[in-house]
Amino acid sequence: MMTKDKKLELLNIIARDENLTYAQMALLAGMSEAEVAATIYELEQEGVIVGKHTLINWDKAGQERVVALIELKVTPQYGEGFDRIAERMWQYPQVRSVYLMSGAYDILVEVEGATMKEVALFAAERIAPMDCVVSQNTCFVLRKYKQNGIVYEKDNQDDRQVVL
Amino acid sequence: MAFDINSTLNKTVVDIPPSGIRRFFDIAATMEDVVSLGVGEPDFVTPWHIREAGILSLEKGHTHYTGNAGLMELRKEICNYMNRRFDLKYDAATQVLVSVGGSEAIDAAIRCLVTPGDEVIIPEPAFVCYVPMVQMAGGTPVTIDLKEEDEFRLTAKQLREAITPKTKLLILPFPNNPTGGIMAKEDLEEIAEVLAETNIVVLSDELYAELTYGGEKHVSIANIPGMMERTVVINGLSKAYAMTGWRIGFACGPAPLIKQMIKVHQFGIMSAPTTAQYAAIEALRNGDSDIAMMKEEYDMRRRYIIDGFNKLGLTCFEPKGAFYVFPCIRSTGLTSEEFCTKLLEEQRVAVVPGNAFGASGEGFIRVSYAYSIKNIEKALERIERFMKK
């Protein structure tokens, strides 16, 4: 049985680079390979490790993808609260993320499509007509600078010089 | 008579050989696609809040000299830091000097203590500056060859054998560059016992004090009862906060020594860079979590690289400090220089021959893990190919 600290250490390692092999993770975390495998299995079962995602700069890959953030004010359903609304949103494959927010609006929905028109129509035809939606504000993402802690255009040049 | 500039040069300086590290990297610089594990400084950029403090000081127009010993606010933070992190208590007004990197403080301390004829004990392998600095001060360096079987620690027996009536100063460079070796409390107690019978001063170079691993917290010799009054501790922000380019180090020690060091510093330097001093205040005040983050990252790389070298048959003892491993390459039948030259020529990997850090470094190479895991992995793959040949 791994201690909580060890589990967290392993999670931090995975969060930074999900492409590491179990052997590499074992070395970095100071665990055995078998322990890594068992712990990861356990964390997946517990729903702590939810999924893996590779961050891709689609602009660079030569495929345009339009992303919009839709800010929604909603009326929560009696007895079901915001969760039921969120669930209705995330069912759409176009919806990449759904967040419950504090502040000026209630729910933030990230939508992805091939063109601006496609995304705008999705917002207008699918989201806006929902009974619970009081108001919406669609904002298109023009450029991504940093996402999930990763900077898109980074200078990786090692400019350290030998001084002695 | 024709003027000859060469005949005018200070022979002591002329006779100091050029750095073995530099020579090596001059070759590497002419090559393409070199993977380096050679550089002796953090790969992290200074944390943003610290850089921002430097920028803010410029915006406010803090562009003048500071007092010679450094900003009082910074000296107070240094005292808080030394107390908080290492349980060492100093008086900001009389016992602290802010220097241009640790190196300047080391030089100032040596010049304030060493006079012609004095002997200075320097355990090796060690950072390359001590011997030349002692020579330039007119002193005589007396080196001690540290042994791998002692995990490159200085033993009381070795120290006792090196002491003569002329011994003035002991340099204690731990955690050590290039070996990664440390001195535990018990080791220091034995050293202290030997020193207690003498009039020898200790210069404890603790630039890597924050970077110790495996639950071994750094202990300064100044923590050992009776040693504080004869120890000048050199530390700085370069390694702990990834601030090498800012050039901020400091010396903490007995007031009479610091008073003289301030003279050397004030005539040669005036004061440490003002922008960097303001950034240093922010680092010491709010940077503990930065240290923790970087240390954790180094520790992971350390485990990764030790395993890599041991698998390649280049055994290395487990270094508990700094960010270097010091694998033994004797099994290859090559000297350190031959190994490094061939490795560079055949596989384009740059590491530093151990003998660049003193004769006792022969048979070893210094490998820095202040590099990304990807870079380390690439280098290990190439070294594996090299070893198979």
Image (tube, coloured by chain):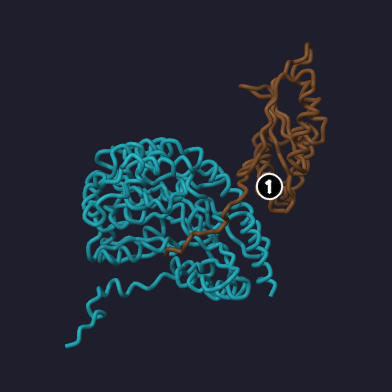
**Label 1 SS:** loop
Chain letter of the residue carrying label 1: A
Q: Where is mark 1, residue-wise?
A: A17
Image quadrant holding the C terminus of chain A, namely bottom left
Q: Residue at x 32, y 46 (%)?
A: B274
**In this view of the protein, which residue sits in the foreground, B1 or B275?**
B275
Q: Amino acid at mark 1?
A: Asp
Q: Is residue B113 left or right of residue B276?
A: left
Image quadrant holding the N terminus of chain A, namely top right
- What chain is colored cyan? B
**In this view of the protein, which residue sits in the foreground, B304 or B152?**
B304
Q: Above or below — where is B62 with respect to A154?
A: above
Q: Position of residue A26 (x, y in %)?
A: 70, 48
Residue B69: quarter of image: top left
- What chain is colored brown? A
Q: Is residue B1 left or right of residue B93?
A: left
Q: Position of residue A4 (x, y in %)?
A: 67, 33
Across the whole image, how many numbered discs are drawn on residues? 1
Q: Is residue B231 left or right of residue B341?
A: left
Label 1, residues with CA under 10 Å away: few <14, some 14-19, many ≥20: few
Viewer can see residue B155: yes
Q: Position of residue B78 (x, y in %)?
A: 36, 40
